[in-house]
Amino acid sequence: MFLDMEQGKLIISKERFGLTIQRLCHQILERHVHLEDLCLIGIQERGVYLAERIKNQLVNMLGSQPFDYGKLDITFYRDDFRRRDTPLKAASTEMNFIVEGRNVLLVDDVLYTGRTVHAAIAALQDFGRPSSIEMLCMVDRRFNRHFPIKADYKGVAVDALDEAYVRVRWKEYHGEDQVLLFSGKSDS
């Protein structure tokens, strides 16, 4: 049952949110023995929120940052950027390294159609040819994928109708860590 439109249905509480971040970091460490070959890249804008948390948690666990970290703007790589009535707001790419021959971990808050990840892979090509690309998301919306893209690491999988949307809220920006499911279409 849905709560009112403003509140949404709670999928991940603030208590479980932190545990989910820790679990994702442990999974990364299990798969990546040599972190100096890892490039952790947050997709602007909302993926950066999760990527920052992952980066900080990994540094807390390891005592240092043996991997590269960056923020990737995909605005002009999106397949719909010329089809909008209003221009897209461009963020900035902050990557002072190349990904040639490296293992890239792309991070976004919600994986839904796969179009954002597709654009991120296209934008990533400007920084070299990675050895591998993996995907990490807080929420994997498994229905209605437009591209054959999957999450290698996911906080939670959510099956919802097209009209529904998921919003990840962050303590630093929204006052509380949580994941909510709303019954109507999102304007953002």
Image: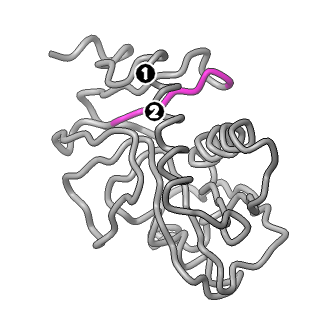
For badge 1, the amino acid type reads: Arg
Q: Label 1: few (<14), some or many (≥20) within 10 Å? A: some
Q: Residue at x 38, y 42 (%)?
A: 139
Q: Which residues are magenta?
A: 166-172
The amino acid at mark 2 is Thr
**Label for residue 16?**
1
Residue 167 part of the magenta segment: yes
Given residues 4 and 30, the one toward you in this image is 30
Secondary structure beneath label 2: helix
Helix, strand or loop status at disc 1 = helix
At 74% from the left edge and 61% from the top edge, which residue is drawn?
67
Q: Is residue 78 above or below residue 94?
A: below
Quarter holding the N terminus is top left
The residue lying furthest to the right in this view is 96
Q: Residue at x 71, y 81 (%)?
A: 127
Q: Which residue is mark 2?
A: 20
Does the stretch in magenta take in 177? no
Q: What's the mark number on residue 124?
A: none
